[in-house]
Image: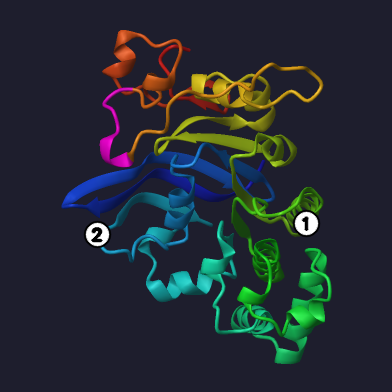
Amino acid sequence: MAETLLKVNNLQTYFSKNNKKIKAVDGVDFEVDKGKILCIVGESGSGKSITSLSIMGLVQNIKGSSVEGTILFEGQDLLNLTDLQLSDLRGNEIGMIFQEPMTALNPIFSIGHQIIEVLRRHKKIPKKEARLIAIKQLKEVGIPRAEEIMNEYPHQISGGMRQRVMIAMMMACEPKLLIADEPTTALDVTIQAQVLELMRRLKDEKGTAIILITHDLGVVAEMADTIAVMYAGQIVESGPADEVFENPLHPYTQALKAAIPIMDEQQERLIDIPGTVPNAANFPAGCRFADRCSRTSTNCYRIMPKYREINSGHFIRCDLV
């Protein structure tokens, strides 16, 4: 029986704009088991990154924001922890690889200084030992001349290199849960494969659970144990990776899969999904995908579909299935 490491229930994240309360994440539920990979997939604006930042406790201090629901990590609700308790968890028990590493790395400290400080704070090890671990981790993520990079600053290296530095920093602490927000976006194909292999090894050898946020269904097919498809702040379909990927039931999931180019077939044009994700300040009353769906009924525009179980562990938010 798999051991659940993280359980998110009815997660709701609010922001305030022009004295109006906006619900950016709306009733999200999912679980992540120890040593398993959950891939959260969806277009930009679906709420994937806000969900991850809410788990990390990095939304709550923004003026006018609030997070409700429960986020149970090893049975402890992260929403009840103090800032100091969350700080102790972040980077140690729970690590996060951010989508834009330039905003996560401190521009006034060298690469080596930042990795060493993270290791010394959470692992309580001597500086010399921390330096050796830092160099080893930089080499593991494919960074050449790692000893020299230790003395350089974030602005002196490329975006792809900065992303690999962030990955090395998080992996060095061997967290129980790793949240990776589009970790391979800035990387070329060779380095992307190397980074994904490192994440798999962390999962297999250390039992690390991983939440991998991505829009790349190729990465999802390769990495996921379970999949959660997000759209307009909600999970619209979730379940075992094989089942969701091979037999998608929600029209949005089907559209995402149909938009993947087929390499061994000649296509006159690529398939796209018409329209855009609705703004969180103006979500429709009914199904949020209705305006872009090809098989709607009148009720789709009026009634919000319930999130329900179709098969064992396979959930969907659609009344047409």
Q: Find the residue positioned furthest to the left.
A: 19
Please state the extent of the stretch shown in magenta in the rendering.
280-286
193 and 23: which one is in front? 193
Quarter of the image where one finds residue 290: top left
On the image, numbered disc 1 is attached to which residue? Answer: 198
Relative height, residue 145 to residue 20 (above, below): below
Quarter of the image where one finds residue 227: top right
Q: In the image, residue 167 lies at what x, y percent? A: 68, 63
Asked whether 284 falls inside the magenta stretch, the response is: yes
Circle nearer the N terminus (2, 1):
2
In the drawing, does residue 47 fall left or right of residue 189?
left
Report the coloring of the rendering: rainbow
Q: In the image, residue 110 lies at what x, y percent? A: 64, 83
Q: Which amino acid type is shown beneath numbered disc 1?
A: Leu
> For mark 1, does the 10 Å Cα neighbourhood hold few (<14), some (14 to 19), or many (20 or more) residues?
some
On the image, numbered disc 2 is attached to which residue? Answer: 64
Residue drawn at point x = 79 percent, y = 68 percent: 143
Q: In the image, residue 283 lies at what x, y percent? A: 30, 33
Q: Label 2 vs label 1: CA separation?
A: 38 Å
Q: In the image, residue 306 lies at what x, y percent? A: 37, 24
Residue drawn at point x = 61 percent, y = 58 percent: 177
Q: Which amino acid type is shown beneath numbered disc 2?
A: Gly
Q: Secondary structure at mark 2?
A: loop
